[in-house]
Image (cartoon, rainbow, N blue to C red):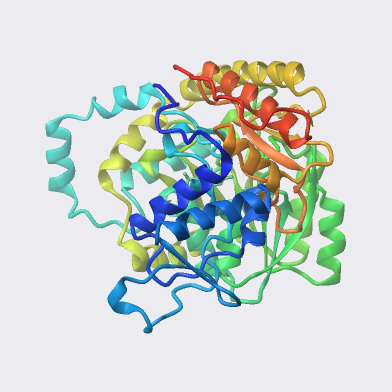
Amino acid sequence: MLLESGARTGPLHRRVSDGIRELVDLGELPPGALLASERDLAVALAVSRTTVVTAYQTLHQEGRLERRQGSGTRVSLPVAHHGARETVSANVLAGDHAATPFLNGPLATIDFSSAALPFLPLVADVASSVTRDDYLRLGGEHHGYHPRGLPALRERLAGWYTESGLPTTPDQILITNGAQQALEIIIAGCVQPGDGVVVEDPTYRGAIEAFDQAGCRIRPVRCDENGMDVAALARLAAAGPPRLVYAQSTVHNPTGAVLTPDRRLRLVKVASEHDAVLVEDTVLAGTVFDGPSLQPLAAIDDNARILTVGSMSKLFWGGLRLGWIRGSTRAISRLAQLKGFSDLGTSLVSQQIAARLLDHMDEAAESRRAELAVGREHLTRLLAEHLPEWTWTEPAGGPSLWVALPAADTAHFAQVALRFGVAILPGSVFSAGGLGADHTRLPYSLPHSVIAAGVYRLARAWSVYLGEGPEHVPVVSVTT
Ligand SMILES: Cc1ncc(COP(=O)(O)O)c(C=O)c1O
């Protein structure tokens, strides 16, 4: 795959004006839309104000933008509409997301912003083993709507938990469209707006967004190389018990940490003492590099307030959209109603494939771990060589590295990196407590040539960010 075609090149002001022109011509910035001030856009894109002034002037001369003293810069109205101005949006272009397309065409970018794992070819083998007769049987036996999930899959998952030491019955399992929907359903069933919810800091951004959308009071608890600081959780809970604690004890996104045995015991104890719902997200649990496999927290004390969330996304493929919740029979019945209200049930086709994939869990985990361990080695070696001042703690599992950039503001550095064709996320998106501004998460689940090209580009972006390198370094081609 050639990653370079479509890259924006040339002086920065032209890249900015090209990006805005494209959005205006596509109608994404509608007539009358108010653009960010020159200063705000310059800050958001980490460019000079002169760059933005020149870009706006170019588009003004082309008739695409109108500029009035005191009323800002707007997308020009069609001639017939002049005089009937309407404010479309108060601050179009001010946010990071809106700003992203300006400096790069989508094909130019090496995407380090996602830590999704690649498709496991085993999924194709197993999916293609489902025959016409299997589908006829499935269609004959089921009308197609199963809010709780396909009975055969729930049985299979219950058996898998039981074999691994956590006795489970099928009515303790609810199938969902991925772990993300599992979280949404748990939120709908267990918390009200204003409820206190503890999350690790940093944590999975999808969880922060879901709790935030639900109007929860998010209470971050620091997380170190051994996972959540459970002593800090105990202090926080003593001061005001949270309604729910969300924890990733076995392989934490984004740090790759695994919670130590004594912290696991204490976490379960603290949550139970304060009557909090304990949601354990085990989505990355199959990716621990070394050591014995760890059981879910529910194996410590299988009480009615512990919910375990799992998914096929990391071991097999996110495209299956297949996850689940394990909990008490009563909790699962209640959550199943909410699942039914939401979508009447997950696709039986995906569930049928998932049921067969469960027979290959160990094989998938082994192949993932082996690939990820090599990827981790590759990325850390390149970083040590090209960005020696960046630091990290070796992850115990998972697909990514949580990297500290000394004294950096990664929101700004991300903009510079984009100019070099690499998309990274500022660490702050993983934090509900204002941490992570000097961190970013780098994935090592990508092809090695892409990781290498990404690191070279980041190294050049870093020297520009530090004011040491030339601004306009041509972006190298990467073929994978
Ligand atoms: C910790 C964590 N939980 C949940 C999810 C969502 O997973 P799914 O694809 O099963 O919805 C992810 C996805 O990246 C994740 O990292």
149 on left or right of 223? left
| Residue 177 versus residue 262 in the image, above or below | below
107 on left or right of 56? left
The C terminus - image quarter: top left
Q: Which residue is drawn at 12% across and 47% down?
A: 140
Q: Where is residue 334 in the image (x, y as percent from the top left)?
A: 46, 67
Residue reaching furthest to the bottom: 84
Residue 449 visible to the viewer: yes
Q: Residue at x 75, y 40 (%)?
A: 259
Which of 264 and 44 lies nearest the eye of the viewer? 44
Q: Position of residue 201 (x, y in %)?
A: 74, 51
Number of residue marks: 0
Which of 89 and 202 lies nearest the eye of the viewer? 89
The N terminus - image quarter: top left
Which of 64 and 352 lies nearest the eye of the viewer? 64
Q: Where is residue 173 in the image (x, y as percent from the top left)?
A: 45, 51
Q: Position of residue 129 (x, y in %)?
A: 24, 25
**Where is residue 132, by image quadrant?**
top left
| Residue 95 versus residue 288 in the image, above or below | below
**Where is residue 232, by image quadrant?**
bottom right
